[in-house]
Image (tube, rainbow, N blue to C red):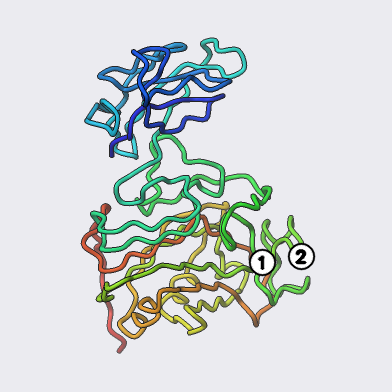
Amino acid sequence: MKTTGSLIAIGLGAVLFSCLPCSARAQTSGCVVPPAGLVGWWPGDGNADNLVGPSGTLENSAGFAAGQVGQAFDLDGQTQYVATDLDAANNTITQEAPVYAHFSTTDGDWDALSLILHDTPEADLMVRTGDIDNLGFGWPTGFDPFSGNSTPAHAFPWSIDPNDPPGTDRIMVITSYNGHPPAGRDGYTSTTSRPANNVHPIELDYDLGELAVRSAVLQMFVDDFQAPVWHATYQVTLNGVRAPFLETIINALNQTGPIGKLISVALPAEFLPQVQSGSLVIDFDDPTTGAGDGYAIDFVKLLVNLKSFTQEGTIEGTVRLPE
């Protein structure tokens, strides 16, 4: 992927910024005065020089390309980054702090709480609810959330950000849990309470225009589902319609840790009219067993008319027919 221009850091929060730094170039109508609290500004003009502090180094074959303003960093959104040595408290050198540009042509700005993209390398339409941030914990260095690999275990509970879309980045405990679970309860259930841990559906709203839905794939970054351990039986609905193909997957997950991973599921033809409606409401719940199982969702992504996946793999195994 390409950044749109400069990388700037206020504290140690790096963000993309399309601009010319007034302090370093001849002033133009498009230049920007450095904001207060600035500790790092990397224009990306053919090097990793920092205009206001220690310069960085390009890692894992990171490079440069044409940006919206001058040159820009050209990063793959996965392992390539600009390594810096900034200490936000006193602007002195301490330890390496990688600066990632969380942007990709397939998913846009990872920090966006919701996003719609047309004609991406993956699909005719991409709709996403939830930012791509591992429930707010961030991604380990070099970890690709779209690889299908599981994250390392993370801490819990955590504070809910009221800006996150309903159903994302929060612990949810199934509605049938009443304090007397049949097989004990997990950490999410033990450390949270009603109503903060109530189940919230996840909603995707979009305008298809003249686009006809020929196929659709759901990608969901799911966390801590443990139905086999706590004897839960999840029901998954799309616009209120039971989706057995999703229930089979969710009820087979054992994400003790807690850990998260991406699951990708092609929607059967009978569910394509739900996608064509321009709104998809997804609900994960267990209304019957009373199991002590909580879970979380980082983001949900809908791909309409899939072209290809950016991540592909091979599965080998043996299929046995019933005797």
Q: Nearer the viewer, residue 153 or 54?
A: 54
Q: Position of residue 194 (x, y in %)?
A: 76, 65
Q: Quadrant of residue 225?
A: bottom right
Location of the C terminus by quadrant is bottom left
The disc, 1 or 2, on the residue closer to the chain's N-terminal end is: 1
Q: Decide which of 234, 15 is in the foreground and name it.
A: 15
Q: Is residue 75 left or right of residue 300?
A: left
Query: Residue drawn 34% across and 60% down?
Result: 126
Few, some or many C-alpha atoms within 10 Å of disc 1 (few <14, some 14-19, many ≥20)? Answer: many
Location of residue 274 with respect to 318 vertically, above or below: below
Residue 117: quarter of image: bottom left
Q: Residue furthest front?
A: 29
Query: Residue 216, position in %: x, y?
Result: 31, 71
Q: Quadrant of the N terminus?
A: top left
Percent across and percent down for residue 208 are 33, 70
Residue 79, disc: none
Q: Are marks 1 and 2 in contact (CB under 8 Å)?
A: yes
Percent x, y of residue 105:
29, 47
301 sits left or right of 239 in the view: left
Q: Secondary structure at mark 2?
A: loop
The quadrant holding residue 20 is top left
Q: Amino acid at mark 1?
A: Val
Please name the residue shown 67% across and 58% down the image: 188
Instruction: State the residue at coordinates (41%, 17%).
Output: 22
Labelled disc at residue 173: 1
Q: Residue under label 2, please give it.
A: 194
